Image (cartoon, rainbow, N blue to C red):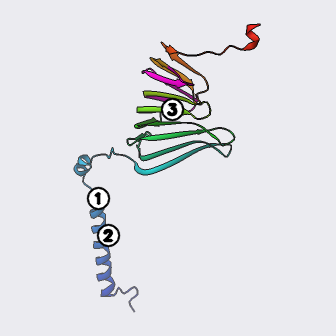
Amino acid sequence: MIVGLIDANMIKNLKLFSIAILLLFFACATPDNNLKDMVEYKGPLAVLKNVETFYSDSALVRIKMIAPKQIEETDGNQKFPKGIRIEFFNSQGIKYSYMVANSGVYTSSTGIFTAVGNVVVIDSLEDKKLNTELLHWDRKNKTIYTDKFVTIVREGNVLTGDGLTAAQDFSTWKLTNPKGQATLENDEEEEE
């Protein structure tokens, strides 16, 4: 009696299985010289169209960003090459101001958003308007600033300056090298 007889078909199947495994192993292996020729992708992570982004605090919308095109970079930076509109809301959900620009860039390492080209900021509640060509917005510190020429129109008065630092809500602001004429109101208590 012979124990452990191996069938001829089993040997044939074992050989085919071994050859298939070897083919798969060598087919998946890439020679080192092909790896050296590969180029790392450095393009955008995503390109988005007609984007609306909401930022909230305590379940209330505080900021709304609208852009026809947004490019997400692999380093976290964002580009808005076809324009941007940023709307600011108060704690009651009322839009108090907004900013528009021809383009914008968000730099993730600094947290600074830079608006470029025909930048306009409107304070809807106090009828103030700011115009400049470059404006930085620091969302963390809730400030806007520029070292470029600025025009502010407020209550019929036109003020200009060579730069500006302001609160994000445009409630307080300071011009660098201010010029222009403005009508100032006196409090009745001060006249006594």
Q: Secondary structure at mark 3?
A: strand
Task: Report whether 88 appears left or right of 74.
Answer: right
Q: Would residue 154 be counted in the magenta stretch?
A: yes
- Residue 137 image label: none
Residue 121 position, x and y percent, is 51, 32
Q: In the rendered image, which residue does mark 1 sit on?
A: 29
Q: In the rendered image, which residue does mark 3 sit on?
A: 121
Q: Amino acid at mark 2?
A: Ile
Q: Quadrant of the C terminus?
A: top right
Of the pair 174 and 30, the residue shown nearer to us: 174
Front of the two marks 1 and 3: 3
Of the pair 48 and 73, the residue shown nearer to us: 48
Question: Is residue 117 shown above or below 189?
Answer: below
Task: Report whether 98 appears left or right of 115.
Answer: right
Q: To which quarter of the image does residue 140 belong? A: top right
Question: Is residue 90 shown above or below 161?
Answer: below
Residue 146 position, x and y percent, is 46, 23
Q: In the rendered image, which residue does mark 2 sit on?
A: 21
Which residues are drawn in magenta? 133-158
Q: Would residue 74 be counted in the magenta stretch?
A: no
Front of the two marks 2 and 1: 1
